[in-house]
Image (cartoon, helix red, strand yellow):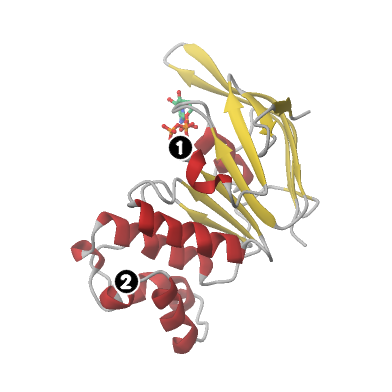
Amino acid sequence: MAKIKLVNINKTFWQKDYPLQVLKRINLLIDEPGLYVLCGPSGSGKTTLLNLISGLDFPTSGKVYINDKLIDYKPTNIALIFQNHYLFNDLTAFDNVCLSAYITNQEINLESINLLFKQFQLTHIINQKVKFCSGGEKQRISILRAIVSNPEIIIADEPTGALDEKTANIIVDNFKKLSYKRIIIVITHNKKLFKKVADKIFNLKNGQLYEENTKTMEESHCI
Ligand SMILES: Nc1ncnc2c1ncn2[C@@H]1O[C@H](COP(=O)(O)OP(=O)(O)OP(=O)(O)O)[C@@H](O)[C@H]1O
Ligand SMILES: [Mg+2]
């Protein structure tokens, strides 16, 4: 089963001549499947933290382990859903979702892909070019692209940001189902939306990580 371990993570960015320490001695162990929610004010370092877990960036000091292996490249068992989608506008929704399979020469299971589009209420735009899709549709296409490869770990940065409440709930319900077998980490500004389904809620404040008791809302420092 997938496992994420962060040990004494510090991350400092240089902004002009000044250092900005975004993450301060963060420790975290996630070793069970589940839906893990990461909250915190804008600029608190949420995306920075997920970039370190997914190998897109490296800590100033400290270590990131995925499945007990020190991270030194972008692991293929982690799927990412980005804050700003990164879809190919001139390709159809279907081709965007299947692109990685085309490139790696994998067989495409039409039935399961059609089912995914149905589950996320996207059947009507399956053959539409992404540039003609709405913001919320693009957001869901980027989610399908991430989950189609059946990854062990899914990391999603604000996956419900562009969605109305009903559509956001479709994402939440699907993430919950997917989280029984894998680790899903979701960044959100909408804690209320995930509260009922989250296995754990973490709050990032002043560079430090706190775990929130989902019932009492009390916080404890992650050390
Ligand atoms: N490459 C970089 N160089 C310099 N500063 C950076 C860099 N990346 C992020 N920062 C700064 O680090 C801080 C944390 O940024 P980050 O994107 O992690 O915030 P966030 O919690 O994801 O915010 P939001 O909720 O707005 O997406 C911000 O002040 C940002 O300006
Ligand atoms: Mg962010």
- Image coordinates of residue 5 in percent, x first then y, are 75, 43
Q: Secondary structure at mark 1?
A: loop
For the residues labelled 2 and 1, say whether their Cβ atoms are less than 8 Å apart.
Answer: no
- Image coordinates of residue 11 in percent, x first then y, are 61, 26
Q: Mark 2 vs mark 1: give the one in front.
A: 1
Q: Within 8 Å of ligand 1, the CB of disc 1?
A: yes
Q: Write down the residue under mark 1.
A: 189
Q: Amino acid at mark 1?
A: His
Q: Earlier in the sequence, mark 2 or mark 1?
A: 2
Q: Residue at x 60, y 22 (%)?
A: 207
The one of 23 and 31 positioned closer to us in this rendering: 31
Instruction: Give the total number of marks visible in the rendering.
Output: 2
43 relative position to 126: left or right: right
Q: Is residue 80 above or below residue 133?
A: above
Residue closest to the far top: 17
Q: Amino acid at mark 2?
A: Ala
Q: Is residue 187 above or below residue 12?
A: below
The one of 58 and 140 positioned closer to us in this rendering: 140
Q: Is residue 73 above or below residue 118?
A: above
Q: Residue at x 37, y 65 (%)?
A: 141
**Residue 198 seen in this snapshot:** yes
Q: Which mark is residue 93?
A: 2
- Image coordinates of residue 34 in percent, x first then y, are 68, 55
18 relative position to 10: left or right: left
**Residue 108 seen in this snapshot:** no
- Image coordinates of residue 211 in percent, x first then y, are 69, 33
Measure the C-alpha gap from mark 2 to mark 1.
Answer: 27 Å
